[in-house]
Image (cartoon, rainbow, N blue to C red):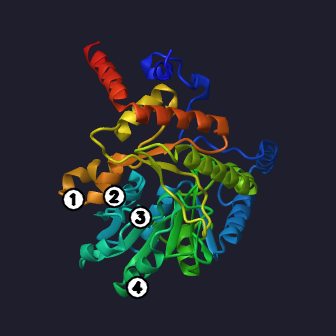
Amino acid sequence: MTELQELAIFGGKPAFGEDHKLVVGRPNIGDRDELFRLIGEALDRRWLTNAGPLVQEFEQRLADYLGVKQCVTVCNATIGLEIAARALGLKGEVITPSFTFIATAHALQWLGLKPVFCDVDPETHNIDPAQIEKLITENTTGIMAVHLWGRPCAIEQLTEIAARRNLALIFDAAHAFGCSHGDGMIGSFGDVEVFSFHATKFFNTFEGGALTTNNDELARQMRLMRNFGFKGYDEVDSVGTNGKMSEVSAAMGLVSLNSVAEFVAVNKRNYDLYRAELAGVAGVSVIDYNESERNNFQYIVLQIPANPEGLTRDDLRLALWEENVIARRYFYPGCHRMAPYDSNGPYDLPVTEQLADELLLMPNGTAVTEDDIRKICRMIGLMMAHPAEIRSKLESAQAAATTS
């Protein structure tokens, strides 16, 4: 049997069984005994939400870790973005990238704001400051930028534009917990930064998020907003929502925080191994990180440029899925090509369009072993070296599925 015949797409046994599927974003789990101890204490107190002791401790430890004055935890980052935008009084139009998770745009649209999509830099994949000025109108009130892959935005340039044009500046830092820029941690820039602690993030609280700021008054407003606007036992100060983090989520956060260095070390090990194993594979590159700054190395991002003679990104993805390696397209097809935004075009976002068609994210985290990575990379090398055969098998499978 040739090497090609051993691939699942040619009838071979999948490299990974159904009970060991490798997926992007499998949760990291810290000390279970400590987690159960904290949850048990919360149950004994019968204080399960409404800014309990664990939430208070978690907020303080996050603020200390990030070197920021104020941290406001929330039930998830989408609610966090909405609270941030509302607290800053945003109206009309807000400039944001299309190359991001749909929640970034939805948070604005949900509040009746108009997301104005800006293209991204081809090297950093972050919002392009050079394009922002062209999009500012008399209706623009803010910029919502995204630290994609945990790589910081052009923070100084965005800060200068926002100050000069009198715009609010929010950073969607969903990818960037534990990352730094210059002498500071991500979390201390702009008017407010918003983190995601969703289960798919390397640092998770089951579900959850946090808003961080050095503006005490802004933090006060956001705390009110996450609790229906209550400023006293039966006194409502303003419109609010239910954005509170539970004690169970805070317990998971405290345990995760104890293990964050370990999680990052595993991610870095895996990232280095992917880069080494794929270094000689034509048609595939792994995006890099500035190792003079801190990063969480959560995202293993492959770029497969269009090549008429080679495999496309989607060819490779489908072939890997047959092996139970569930690689993911991020952020396909771009917010501007999803409802309801696709009807608002036309859009001129050439870099976004290109990246959406070329990037593929690979499994990472503590659930992935070094042997797993070596096996994945050997398969990628084999697949990329035989594009005609792989494409032929994919086309045959698609034709059979269509006629069945």
- Can you tell which quarter of the image residue 17 is in? top right
Q: Which class describes the residues within 10 Å of circle 2: few (<14), some (14-19), or many (20+)?
A: many
> Mark 3 and mark 2: span between their CA atoms?
10 Å
Mark 1 touches mark 2? (CB < 8 Å): yes
Residue 158 vertical placement versus 15 (above, below): below
> To which residue does mark 3 refer?
126
Judged from the image, the secondary structure of the residue bearing numbered disc 2 is loop
> To which residue does mark 4 refer?
163
For marks 3 and 4 on the same chain, the one whose residue lies earlier in the sequence: 3
For marks 1 and 4 on the same chain, the one whose residue lies earlier in the sequence: 4
Going by the picture, which residue comes out furthest to the bottom? 164
| x and y percentages locating residue 374 in the rendered image | 60, 37
Q: Out of 21 and 240, give the one closest to the viewer.
A: 21
Mark 1 touches mark 3? (CB < 8 Å): no
Q: Nearer the viewer, mark 3 or mark 4?
A: 3
- Can you tell which quarter of the image residue 26 is in? top right
Q: Is residue 268 left or right of residue 217?
A: right
Q: Out of 161 and 103, give the one closest to the viewer.
A: 161
Q: What residue lies at 51% left-to-right and 20% top-to-bottom?
A: 6
| x and y percentages locating residue 39 in the rendered image | 76, 46
> Mark 3 and mark 4: span between their CA atoms?
20 Å
> To which residue does mark 1 refer?
347
Q: Please state which amino acid type lies under the numbered disc 4.
A: Ala
Q: Is residue 238 visible?
A: yes
Mark 1 touches mark 4? (CB < 8 Å): no
Judged from the image, the secondary structure of the residue bearing numbered disc 3 is loop
Q: Out of 363 and 28, give the one closest to the viewer.
A: 363
> To which residue does mark 2 refer?
98
Q: What residue lies at 27% left-to-right and 49% top-to-bottom?
A: 337
| x and y percentages locating residue 127 in the rendered image | 38, 66
Q: Please state which amino acid type lies under the numbered disc 3.
A: Asn
For marks 3 and 2 on the same chain, the one whose residue lies earlier in the sequence: 2
